[in-house]
């Protein structure tokens, strides 16, 4: 949608204020407190430790964003807030938004201009390898990413049939949210996850908690450089291409072909845009965010993905929407 009015530009410029309102509400557990039912700003302030005036200011901002409703001086959760932002809710991903997006990625966007102009200072975060070399940063990112990936992983399990697959390689699979979900959905499937050592340590805890230590194993290292096992029935790359240099993309697809068994399937789930470069908006913005700390990253479109998979020998290449307005799932098969 092309913008035609000044207020539409202002809405974009002031978008960071809306983000901070959301992160602040999550920080003070406002949506969880509102799960008990409609309450006044004074009641919410008392429950969250905020002065009533400050609570009312924040709640008013949330009402303006449509995250809470207000009637007769009492605030209540919107349906979306109730479903996705209340702690313990089935589809809660508030921790992911507050911790990974609010605490980590939000700050990294301050360096996006330097990243775009290739002028990042030597001490800036310039890659996932830099970022995850710090155990504390790796832990915060990984634990929050795990929470944020469970929903997409469930979507993937519903979208594909892996009932005949026995071996899956998850390149850059983090703490194993996708591997755990897919192994639970398909009992005949075992998985190998490749990721950095600090991430693998945390991932093994999630795998153990899921009771899948006998079926999910880790290879510690950079997925671009580490050895991959061969003859895989499935190779998954979720949120991988968006976070690595663009010059590595074709090599990763070719390498996947070489490490799949005949008849094996490549799955690429990522922030993919349409070939005409008009969006989706959230996918495009996520790629810009990745560029802030991976300057060599490149925005990938659906047509390029399908063409490149076929270029390296895959057949039946297709790219479909996964998370509406945000991610797509590309898949193709190595001929038998």
Image (cartoon, helix red, strand yellow):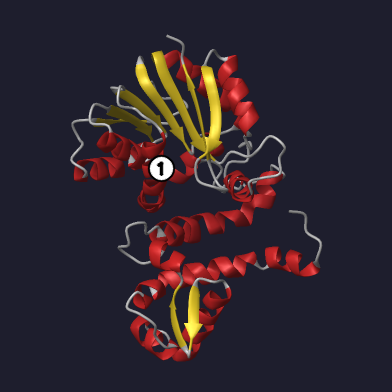
Residue 175 appears in the rendering: no
Side (left or right) of 203 relative to 214: right
Q: Determine the residue positioned at 46% across, 29% down.
A: 267
Q: What is the x, y in percent for residue 249? A: 57, 27
Q: What is the x, y in percent for residue 269? A: 49, 36
Instruction: Using a 10 Å C-alpha cutoff, classify the residue at mark 1 as few (fewer than 14 neighbours), some (14 to 19) or many (20 or more).
Output: some
Q: Quadrant of residue 278?
A: top right
Q: In the rendered image of this protein, does residue 225 appear above or below residue 159?
A: above
Side (left or right) of 144 relative to 17: left
Q: Determine the residue positioned at 52% across, 75% down.
A: 62
* Closer-to-camera residue (81/130): 81
Element under disc 1:
helix
Q: Determine the residue positioned at 72% across, 37% down.
A: 276
Side (left or right) of 137 relative to 278: left
Side (left or right) of 136 relative to 250: left
* Closer-to-camera residue (107/174): 174
Q: What is the x, y in percent for residue 139? A: 36, 50
Q: In the rendered image of this protein, does residue 321 appear above or below residue 145?
A: above
- Where does label 1 land, which residue? 155
Which quadrant of the rendered structure holds the C terminus?
top left
Residue 43 appears in the rendering: yes
């Amino acid at each position: 949608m092309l913008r035609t009015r000044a207020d539409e530009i202002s809405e974009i410029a002031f978008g960071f204020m809306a983000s901070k309102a959301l992160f602040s509400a999550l920080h003070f557990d406002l949506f969880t407190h509102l799960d008990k039912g409609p309450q006044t700003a004074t009641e919410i302030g008392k429950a969250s430790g905020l002065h009533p005036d400050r609570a009312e200011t924040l709640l008013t901002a949330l009402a303006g964003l449509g995250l809470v409703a207000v009637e007769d001086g009492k605030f209540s959760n919107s349906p979306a807030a109730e479903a996705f932002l209340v702690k313990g809710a089935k589809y809660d991903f508030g921790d992911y938004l507050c911790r990974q997006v609010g605490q980590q990625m939000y700050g990294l966007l301050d360096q996006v201009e330097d990243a775009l102009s290739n002028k990042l200072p030597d001490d800036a975060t310039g890659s996932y390898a830099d970022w995850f070399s710090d155990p504390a940063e790796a832990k915060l990112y990984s634990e929050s990413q795990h929470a944020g990936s469970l929903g997409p992983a469930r979507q993937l399990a519903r979208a594909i049939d892996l009932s005949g697959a026995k071996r899956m390689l998850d390149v850059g699979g983090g703490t194993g949210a996708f591997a755990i979900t897919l192994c639970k959905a398909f009992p005949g499937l075992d998985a190998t996850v490749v990721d950095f050592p600090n991430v693998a340590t945390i991932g093994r805890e999630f795998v153990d908690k899921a009771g899948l230590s006998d079926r999910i194993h880790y290879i510690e290292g950079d997925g671009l450089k580490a050895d991959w096992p061969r003859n895989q029935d499935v190779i998954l790359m979720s949120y991988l291409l968006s976070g690595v240099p663009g010059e590595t993309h074709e090599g990763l697809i070719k390498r996947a072909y070489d490490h799949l068994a005949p008849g094996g399937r490549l799955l690429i789930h990522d922030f993919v845009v349409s070939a005409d470069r008009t969006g989706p908006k959230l996918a495009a913005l996520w790629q810009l965010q990745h560029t802030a700390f991976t300057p060599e990253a490149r925005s990938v479109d659906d047509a390029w993905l399908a063409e490149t998979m076929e270029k390296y020998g895959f057949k039946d290449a297709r790219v479909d929407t996964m998370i509406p307005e945000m991610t797509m799932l590309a898949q193709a098969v190595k001929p038998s």
